[in-house]
Image (tube, grey):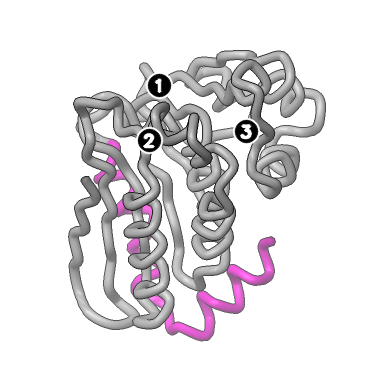
Amino acid sequence: MIALDRRGNGTEALWTLTIDRTDKANALRRDMLQEILTIFEAAAAEQIGGLILTGAGTVFSAGADLDQAKVGLATDQIWERVSARLASLDCMTIAALNGTLAGGAFGMALACDLRISVPSAKFFYPVMQLGFAPQPSDPQRMTALIGPSKTRLILMASERIDAATALDWGLIDRITEPDSLLPTAHAWIEPTLAAPLEIRRKIKRMCP
């Protein structure tokens, strides 16, 4: 369900985490979120240089597994723990969005330093329709990127936007074709991998 590719060692290491549950649109179960959190903890402990998040198939993630959402996953604190741990990493983090991003999966993308998307991706967070509130940090991080009004459009009006709109609003940083998605993410991360740990840590903290 969660695949991890490791390249390099120590502070020059680049990890790529892939959500791989294509039969369920990469919907996340609690055990998957716990595994992701464990990987983030290991990344912090090993002081890796870069982390890329992506998905298998044509959807990044549909958010919470619906069956588990109905019995508590939608409001479980693990979502917040996952996004908070990701946001606190000293390495460069990139969400390489191979397709649609929905619901609780937004937390991980918003917690990354940069976001890149394929042209076909759609972005929506229908928590109000489902009777849930978003995880606490998501509206704050989304507002920092796109402003309060556009955040309300997504969270309160349940607006579904395409990749071009997401780029125009500042929700993502670039659109690229699927075969260029990971190569572009790698190119963005290479300068960070080559930098001394203290320098990249200092620069990242200067850009909250």
Residue bearing the label numbered 2: 97
The image quadrant of residue 99 is top left
Q: Amino acid at mark 1?
A: Ala
Rendered image: mark on residue 121: 1
Residue bearing the label numbered 3: 170
Residue 94, compared with residue 57, is above or below; it is below
Q: Residues within 10 Å of mark 1 (few under 14, many from 20)?
A: many
| Label 3: which secondary element | loop
Residue 73 within the magenta-colored segment of the rendering: no
Distance between the alpha carbons at the discs numbered 1 and 3:
15 Å
Q: Nearer the viewer, residue 80 or 45?
A: 80
Circle 2 or circle 3, nearest the eye: 2
Q: Quadrant of the C terminus?
A: bottom right
Q: Residue at x 45, y 83 (%)?
A: 197
Q: Nearer the viewer, residue 67 or 165?
A: 67
The image quadrant of residue 146 is top right
